[in-house]
Image (spheres, helix red, strand yellow):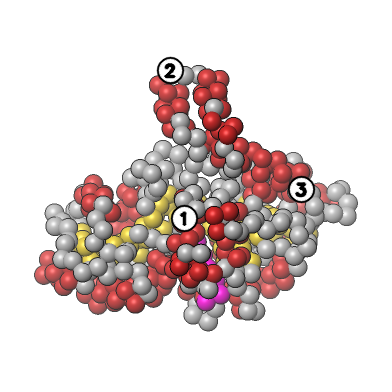
Amino acid sequence: MDQPLRIVVAKPGLDGHDRGAKVVARALRDAGHEVIYTGLRRTSQQIVDTVRDEDARFLGLSSLSGAHAHLFPQVCEKLREAGLDDVIVFGGGIIPQEDRPALHEVGIRAVFGPGTPTAEILEFITEASGRDDAGVGQSNDWHWESSA
Amino acid sequence: MTEELQQAMEGDRRAIARMLSKIENGSISLADISLERPSIESEAWSTMAITGAPGVGKSVLVDALMTQWAGQGLRVALLAVDPSSPRTGGALLGDRVRMSSVDNPDINERVYVRSIATRSSSGSVPLIVEDMAAFLLACGWQRVLIETVGSGQAELRCAAVADRIVVVEGPARGDGIQAEKAGLLELADIVLVNKADLDGAERHAGELRESYALDGEDAPEVMLTSGLKNIGIEEAAAALLELESTGRALRARMRERLLGRHERRLVLHPSYNSVLNRLCQGTLDIEEALSALQGDSDERTS
């Protein structure tokens, strides 16, 4: 690949479990991408500031605390407010199937549950980066159908 | 001037970040936007390298210094370098994890942090950082700090990109003989012995001072700090802000610039990857590889 993709992996809210985020960050690193890890317990505003200052193309949000339904849409909203409409957002963690349509609706293009092979996440990254309509502020109902 | 450049110059952080990516990727150069690299060795510094071994506490210390300076009203930017994988080219950039100044709403308008991977460069800091720093200065950031990859005794590339060199040491970093060895410590404009609350910090600072005493008057000062416990930070921040060059790094600086630029020329050569592949397959030896990369690089200007 010509230029590595810059990807922020973030942990919003009061959730102290980052094993999953680290596994994903590592898989992205090993695929040749530049991963900026924020560390634990970030506010939505801190995450958006990081995406802006680091000029990231992708943002991965991880939540295992059950607060995804509140926090993920908040991050997406703030990204749009900051003019970062072309950033592609995906999520992962303990996120029940019935919660996912609402997340897709606010612009999250993939939601990965426990047991997702890391190869699938990489396939999503490749597919989404090849599209020009996958950003969080771009109106389009495309999303990735994840296996777990 | 493009709209994005205009916005960046006016302080729009998203535009600044995107312009920095373009500079880093080589899709625009400083010459394209009529900027020059600021002259190095000037009276007051604008770029400062923070270097030292992995784990001595550089990130936390830099964060504490930025908090001080931004609190005084200075606009401070940090280019934080972490290594790229030599196998895949990927990188995990984790310096932000230890940064609180970027998240502090009282000062974060005056703090900019950008994580950078070494990519194809071999040193503790890629040479392109110099151009990225020049761009930040042109956008109104008053001081640019460059945190290098954790580096050992002989990694001097940072001299090529910064006006001042701060070497961060830690406690119990070997016996007195370590302080006598040649290398990075000779280029320091100041040495901060960090983790000052731990055993061995005072002793190590003493050994360094003893060693520098033999250098005479241009020897750098040695100070004790703890970024985590906030020891000596106010004093160090004040001393660093006024830090003068010891002038010891001039020749090394020019040498590192020459070598760094030469390396960049090789790495950017159109045949670089195919030559590397052929070296791996054994269809080329090193001498042949060197001459293959010599070719059009002579005609390249930068």
Q: Cβ–Cβ below 8 Å for labels 1 and 2? A: no
Is A37 included in the stretch rendered in magenta?
Answer: no
Residue that extends furthest to the left in the rendered view of this protein: A98
Q: Is residue B55 visible?
A: no
| Left or right: B84 as drawn, with respect to B34 | left
Mark 3–mark 1 Cα distance, whole angstroms, equals 30 Å
| Left or right: A17 as drawn, with respect to B287 | left
Q: Amino acid at mark 3?
A: Leu
Q: Amino acid at mark 1?
A: Lys
If the image is split into quadrants, where does the C terminus of chain B sit? top right
Mark 2 is surrounded, within 10 Å at the Cα level, by few (under 14), some (14 to 19) or many (20 or more) other residues, namely few
Q: Is residue A10 visible?
A: yes
Image: A63 above or below A118: below
Q: Cβ–Cβ below 8 Å for labels 3 and 1? A: no
Mark 3 is surrounded, within 10 Å at the Cα level, by few (under 14), some (14 to 19) or many (20 or more) other residues, namely some
Mark 1 vs mark 2: in front: 1
Output the chain of dot 1.
B
Q: Regarding mark 1 in the picture, which secondary structure is present there?
A: helix
> On the same chain: label 3 and label 1?
yes
Please tell me whether the stretch drawn in magenta is mainly helix, strand or loop.
Answer: strand
Q: Nearer the viewer, residue A82 or B80?
A: A82
Q: Nearer the viewer, residue B272 or B7?
A: B7
Q: Quadrant of residue A17?
A: bottom left
Q: Earlier in the sequence, mark 1 or mark 2?
A: 1
Mark 3 vs mark 1: in front: 1
* Residue behind mark 2: B283
Q: Which residue lies at the image location 67% right of the left edge and 63% below the top edge?
A: B46
> On the same chain: label 1 and label 2?
yes
